Image (spheres, rainbow, N blue to C red):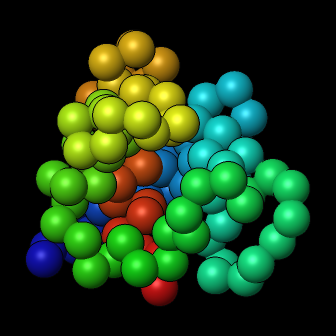
């Protein structure tokens, strides 16, 4: 990876983290925990996200874009088909999620 592509990837990860953490944008923390610890309240509705680094990027993208394709009764909003996040914003969130161990 060249230094310019590394810098671009790092910026994409930062953007994804900001979207992930921001209430009103992704607001992912409202339902998901990222540190693997059990908590009550916000962050306990959806699955923990600590193992997504092993998932293919497209699978993560698809879950965010439209979770109903693999789980018709999902309570997760379809951020892509509802237009809440753009293609680029979803890709940024995916880049961030791939860094979580």
Q: Nearer the viewer, residue 97 or 78?
A: 78
Examine the rendered structure and indicate whether residue 5 appears above or below residue 36.
above
The image shows residue 83 at horizontal and vertical percentages of 40, 14
In the rendered view, tell whether residue 4 sits above or below residue 26.
below
Q: Residue 87's spot in the image, x, y percent?
A: 27, 29
Q: Is residue 53 visible?
A: yes
What quarter of the picture does the N terminus occupy? bottom left
Q: Residue at x 53, y 36 (%)?
A: 75
Q: Position of residue 79 (x, y in %)?
A: 43, 27
From what the image shows, is residue 25 above or below residue 38? above
Asked if residue 36 is positioned above or below residue 87 in the image, the reply reads: below
Q: How many marks?
A: 0
Observer able to see residue 90 = no
As drawn, which residue projects farthest toward the top?
83
Please state the horizontal and vertical placement of residue 9, each as a whole percent of the image. 30, 61
Depth check: give the residue in front, 96 or 55: 55
User: In the image, 34: left or right of 98?
Assistant: right
Q: Which residue is at 73% across, 46% downward?
A: 30
| Residue 81 found in image quarter | top left
Q: In the displayed structure, does residue 49 sit left or right of residue 4?
A: right
Outermost residue toward the right? 40
56 or 11: nearer the viewer: 56
At horizontal 66% and vertical 79% (from top left) the residue drawn is 35
Left/right of residue 91 with respect to residue 96 in the rendered view = left
Residue at left offset 56%, top offset 69%: 48
């Amino acid at each position: 990876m060249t230094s310019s592509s590394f810098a671009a990837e790092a910026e994409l990860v930062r953007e994804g983290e900001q979207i992930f953490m921001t209430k009103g944008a992704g607001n992912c923390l409202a339902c998901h925990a990222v540190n693997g610890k059990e908590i009550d309240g916000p962050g306990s509705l959806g699955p923990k996200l600590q193992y997504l680094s092993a998932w293919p990027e497209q699978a993560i993208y698809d879950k965010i874009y439209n979770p109903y394709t693999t789980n018709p009764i999902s309570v997760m909003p379809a951020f892509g088909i509802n237009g809440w996040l753009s293609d680029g914003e979803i890709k940024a969130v995916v880049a961030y999620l791939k860094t979580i161990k």
